[in-house]
Image: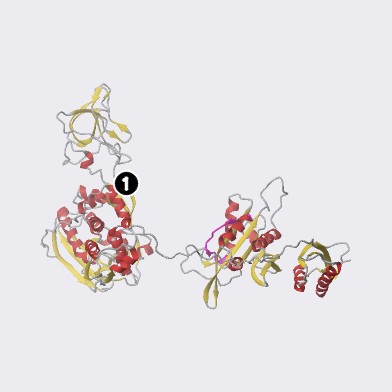
Amino acid sequence: MQFSESWLRTFVNPSLSSGELSHLLTMAGLEVEEMTPVAPAFDKVVVAQVLSKDKHPDADRLNVLTVDVGQVEPLTIVCGAGNVTVGMKAPCALVGAKLPGIEIKQAKVRGVASFGMMCSEKELGLAEESAGLMELKEAAVVGQSIREHLDLDDHLITLKLTPNRSDCLSLNGIAREVAALTGAALQALPQTAFKQAGKESRKAKLSAAAACPRYTGRVISGVNAKATTPAWMVQRLQRCGLRSISALVDVTNYVLLELGQPLHAFDLNKLNGDIEVRFARNGESLKLLNEQTVELQDDMLVIADGNGPVALAGVMGGAGSAVDEATTDVFLESAFFAPSVIVGKSRRLGFASDSSYRFERGVDFAATQLALDRATQLILDICGGHAGAVTEATGEMPVRHPVRLRTSRVLRVLGVALETEEIAQILTRLGMAFQQRGGEFTVTPPSYRFDIAIEEDLVEEIARVHGYENIQPAAIQARMNILPNIEAERPLAKIRQAMVLRDYQEAITYSFVEAEWENTLCSNEAPIPLKNPIASQMSVMRSSLLGGLVNALRTNLARKQPRVRLFEIGACFKVEAGSYAQEERLAGLAYGGTVSEQWGVTARNVDFYDVKGDIEALFAPRNLTFQAAAHPASHPGRSARILLDGRAIGWVGELHPQWQQKNDLPQALVWFEVELAALTQSAVPKLQDISRFPPVRRDLAVVVDESMAAQSLLDAMRAEKAANVSELALFDVYRGKGVEQGKKSLAFRVLLQDTQKTLTENEIEENMSRLVAALQRQGAQLRM
């Protein structure tokens, strides 16, 4: 909400500078988003009156003026403005004045001495363009500072209000806050002095009393709709961001800003019969003031006459009953509409209004007639006329339930011991009625506070008025123990560090993904849908991190990054046993070269085994096994399930060619995804003697069927648990001459070692025989 500081100070004027006032409001929860002066800095500019005008002797477009600036002698000023006339009043910059971008000096203009400069709005920095001198009203006092005359030392303050503070959507509401925060006196509104003179009226019927608990109106007859809006009102409206339309409309907007109560003025002669507040009926439509014709729905509240809807209640009036220059009689409406009935209607129709913005959040239902009387007085003062009797229809008004506030709770929440007298004083300044019994208050919120419902709301109010800056930090008084560092658990920081050391960079992607990703990449036919997705392509919860990483890869490739390695730690979601479950996972992908381009290493693209090595390094010293298996996101034959201690914990593979083509990837990427829980479990090191005796190496070469996995042979040899075997590893795979078709040769390295002695040949042969027997049981034949 934008408002004028000088207007605010007519309600409450604390001894604070503009900056201090801005800081006070922000610290009290009414954030000042912007504060700007209404005019740039300048001085020595006064109201002047042109006494005479003569043509310049040496210039066709210049005039020599004699100007009264409130000094003993009038000044001679050379002026080229086309609209200058004798008797007009306009701003005059005296010698020595500093205007935006120019300093006024005594000078000769074509041989004639000029002792100042007559000013336009552009030269004062009040407008981008101007056609001539700025004309002032006849009532302007000659010699008065123009800053004082036009109130140019004012500031425009813009508040960024939270939705619960609808009570501050008016100058009166903000003034209430400032008075409560500073203790300054709050000025009351001018008393209404009009008398009921008109006899005409309109009855009002509430067919939807729950939606409109209070409806008031008054007929004002004999108004002059062509009356000019006073300059002070126009200025205040403009500084609050509203343009002047007509005197009648300006008054309703003025009271809206002043009291926060939306009003509407109907042309009485365009109404047919009495007023009814009801919900719209099927087939009804209404042309609004913004020229938009809307098809009304049965949950929209309308103001209707005998012919049908004439206004969309709480949102906007209808064009058919609007006031214009021919209006002579007005029906002025002031009502309270339930926020739940108004909320969302303007957004549904594709526009916003000041009225709906306030009614959605809650308007002071006790000030309905106060606003009506205030607007009536202003209309009578500006447009004349005769005010009729008030028409009022009421239903069940909102109830303000008492809220309990305990001083002990204030101490516990704020950590500040406040005396009951101070709390009582704060509640009084906030306009809250209460009863006190010892250290407990029973507080009844005022009608304009829709945000006070529980004890914590009142504690917040106490903190705001007491001042957050006055709540001093206190040292923590509690026993503090160092958290245990469990060696069997691996912290996430270590996992992230391990990935970074393998040349991966962490990515963070949305948990909301495109439904097609789930269907294709994950074969998830029933992903978890979102009720209110933030975008159409983010409509379901992810069951895998792969989609987000592929999308991040595409973003990097679009920015000419030839080599990309990404990883992410995040939650994946699934339906399990009729309820939702989530699992933390780590996923990564590698694309492009194995290393950055350089002269020392031959260029080669990353492959399955590079990423497999990264995964093994991540889990070291624990041993993983990789089992060939198909995954919908992976290339057939280049995909494996990752197992730890015989349990499947993830996948690794090369992206399927169809997904590579669909994502416009010039080459294949290799990806992996594992359960985070498996990574956070760490093997605790065990003390072991280092042998002082040399190891013995033996190699075993066997011929097996092409379909046999080397891992199964390694598992078989390890299952023998040969006492002196310290290491088993595959170091060669051979196909070709000497090995028949459909077969392959696998060569294993066997290291044998004892910590107590040097192994004898018999001990070595005994261990090797056990290993050979284990291989033969798997169908392997020794290669001779």
Disc 1 residue type (three-letter): Thr
Does residue 753 show up magenta in the picture? Answer: no
Classified by dominant secondary structure, the portion drawn in magenta counts as loop
> Looking at the picture, how far across and down is residue 742, in whole percent?
83, 68
Foreground of the two, 661 or 303: 661
| Residue 549 point in image, percent of width and height | 58, 60
Front-lying residue, 139 or 637: 637
Magenta stretch bounds:
502-516
Indicate whether 59 appears above or below 613: above
Q: Position of residue 478 (x, y in %)?
A: 41, 65
For residue 636, what is the image quadrant? Answer: bottom right
Q: Residue at x 23, y 73 (%)?
A: 395
Per the image, the residue denoted by label 1 is 36
Q: Residues within 10 Å of mark 1 (few under 14, many from 20)?
A: few
Residue at 61% over, 58% down: 499
Residue 733 lies in quadrant = bottom right
504 is within the stretch colored magenta: yes
Is label 1 in a helix, a strand or a loop? strand
In the figure, 266 relative to 92: above or below?
Answer: below
Residue occupying image coordinates x 57% and y 68% = 543
